[in-house]
Image: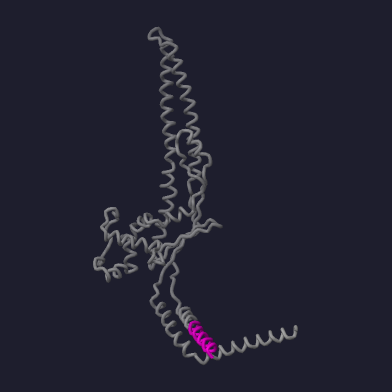
Amino acid sequence: MEQNNIQDDEITLKELILKIKEFVIELFKKWYIILLLTIPAVAYFYYKHINHDVTYTAETKFIIEGQSGGGVSTLLSQFGLKGGGGGGKTNPYKVMEVAKSKLTVRDLLFKQVDGDFIANHILRDYQLIELWSKKKPEFKDFKFTSGDYENFTPLQNKVLLSLIGKVIGSKTEKNPILGFSYDEDSGIFKYNITTKNEDLTLQIIDESYKFIVSFFETDLFQSQGKSTQILKSKADSIKTLIDRKIYQVARISDQSQGLQLQTPNSGKMILEGELLALKTAYGEILKSYELSDVGLQDTKPMFIKLDEPIPPLEPLESSLLISLIKGILLGGLLGASIVIFMKIIRDAMA
């Protein structure tokens, strides 16, 4: 029984080898079909090669340090105030969303580089106006002359939205200028810019990184610090009242030692009681303010740059050899698949 199974296995293996041999012979016999499909594939990849635009990519790597102050919000709530420190570390996905938001990109596009807006540089380098003008003549000779986007015309807004899509990506733009990624294991952000102009690439990545840092380290931090400033204002107001009460008590004491305008002791006792209450309140608010300020400083994110682009940037060019190899492989595999498929169908119908 075992000998029959071995013999069946040997026959099956032999048939497999023979079948492969038949396919190989068929491929050589039908070489013209493979060649017929390889030629257009090679031509396609060659066309892509000669029309490939040289691009330059700049990448900046950074990390963010900064933690929450813990119980600051609880302390502030005792005075009916909302905590300004937030909770936890800076959300990395918040950073990514801010960097790729339309408002951020809009402000970036109207930064001046070499005496002109970044938006106009992109329009020229990618020949977008020439491309759009072929379909819609109103785009002819278009150029942004002002950064006052709140008063833009419908045409200017349309161009602006198209540029924003070019930068961050859209349904029609699959290769955006801006790329952003975050490694959860290392906590490292990678921010990259790719354009056809080396100088423009360097300028955009520098300006955009400065904007992100300014937003989180300055603008957002100042907004979160409003509660702390309210505490400080209350502490200053109480301190002023304490100074007034001290002056009033001192004045009553001075008048009590004279012969005229004697003030009743009850008035002095009332003032001293008010002064004690104000000092107690001032001490509590001052302590809360100091804790709040320390906690706020602890929540302030600190951007630490780990790597930045150094010119000259290496151009990303298309390789003729790799393009030809891609064409040969694609055309060869497609042609071989068709020949084998035809062989299988022919054998099945025989």
Up-down relation of residue 142 to residue 324 (above or below): above
User: Quarter of the image holding residue 110?
Assistant: bottom left
Q: Nearer the viewer, residue 22 or 154?
A: 22
Which secondary structure dominates the residues rendered in magenta?
A: helix
State the quadrant of the C terminus. Answer: bottom right
Tally of marks: 0
Q: Quadrant of residue 195?
A: bottom left
Q: In the image, is residue 89 above or below residue 59? A: above
Position of 179 with respect to 156 (left or right) is right
Check residue 175 for magenta coloring.
no
Instruction: Using residue 156 as the reference point, say whether residue 59 is left or right of it.
Output: right
Q: Position of residue 17 (x, y in %)?
A: 62, 87
> Residue at left 40%, top 63%?
169
Q: Residue furthest bottom?
A: 29
**Residue at screen point 40% across, 53% down:** 211
Query: Residue 324: image x %, image y %?
Result: 46, 81
Q: Which residues are magenta?
A: 332-350
Q: Tell me the quadrant of the picture where the N terminus can be found.
A: bottom right
Q: Position of residue 95 (x, y in %)?
A: 45, 54
Horizontal and vertical percent position of residue 10: 69, 86
Which colour scheme appears in the figure? one colour
- Return the residue nearer the eye: 243 or 279: 279
Looking at the picture, does residue 248 appear above or below residue 21? Answer: above
Front residue of 127 and 252: 127
Q: Residue furthest top?
A: 259
Query: Magenta includes 336?
Result: yes
